[in-house]
Image (cartoon, rainbow, N blue to C red):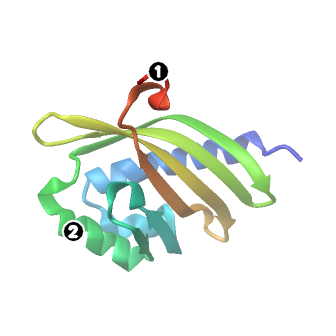
């Protein structure tokens, strides 16, 4: 069965909501985006996995001023994996206070809960070289 358009829109808006909440310092609203047992994998940044909403909030607060001032997400692709579970890929741009920016790929597992769609697992991959390294010699 194909994923309903309404569900695709809900997942896309969920992914976008994350940036609005983080940039606004509304970390207390993280349960609107993530499951309570979320696994936030930042291994590609040398920070390992963060498990649970409290740990995710603590990690953001510990990073403090080193957090981006703006999170932008684009190029969202949603693929149904099973009933009530999808894989979402998206591109993220983080703008820092000094104006520099970086790019990531978010690989999300999103599940339907009693409260709506929520991200259960997020893997962040840094984009460090063009073309995924092709043609780099």
Instruction: Name the residue rendered at 51%, 58% in the picture.
Output: 122
Mark 1 / mark 2, whichever is N-terminal: 2
Identity of the residue drawn at 61% across and 68% down? 115
| Whether residue 82 is situated above or below residue 36 in the rendered picture | above
User: Is residue 2 depicted above or below 64 in this figure?
Assistant: above
Q: Tell me the number on the disc at residue 135.
A: 1
Marks 1 and 2 sit apart, C-alpha to C-alpha, by 39 Å
Q: Local crowd at mark 2 within 10 Å, few (<14), some, or many (≥20)?
A: some
Q: Which mark is residue 83?
A: none
Horizontal side of residue 134 vs 30, given as left or right: right
In the drawing, does residue 5 fall left or right of residue 12?
Answer: right
Outermost residue, right side = 1
Question: Given this view, does label 1 or label 2 mark the residue nearer the observer?
Answer: 1
Residue 119, image x, y percentages: 55, 61
Task: Name above or below for residue 54 compared with residue 101.
Answer: below
Q: Residue furthest left?
A: 98
Q: Residue at x 32, y 61 (%)?
A: 46
Label 1 packing within 10 angstroms: few (<14), some (14-19), many (20+)? few
* Identity of the residue drawn at 25% across and 59% down: 25
Label 2 belongs to which residue? Answer: 61
Q: Secondary structure at mark 1?
A: loop
Give the percent coordinates (x, y) of residue 64. 16, 62
Front one among 121 and 129: 129
Residue 82, located in which quarter of the rendered image?
A: bottom right
| Image quarter hosting the C terminus | top left
């Amino acid at each position: 069965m194909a994923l309903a358009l309404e569900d695709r829109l809900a997942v896309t808006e969920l992914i976008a909501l994350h940036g609005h909440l983080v940039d606004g310092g509304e970390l207390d609203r993280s349960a609107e985006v993530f499951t309570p047992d979320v696994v936030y994998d930042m291994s590609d940044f040398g920070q390992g996995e963060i498990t649970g909403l409290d740990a995710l909030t603590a990690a953001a607060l510990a990073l403090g001023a080193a957090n981006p001032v703006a999170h932008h997400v684009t190029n969202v692709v949603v693929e149904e994996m099973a009933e009530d579970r999808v894989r979402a890929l998206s591109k993220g741009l983080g703008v820092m206070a000094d104006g520099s920016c970086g790019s990531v790929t978010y690989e999300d597992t999103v599940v339907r809960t009693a409260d709506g769609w929520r991200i259960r697992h997020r893997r962040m991959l840094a984009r460090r070289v063009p073309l995924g390294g092709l043609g780099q010699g």
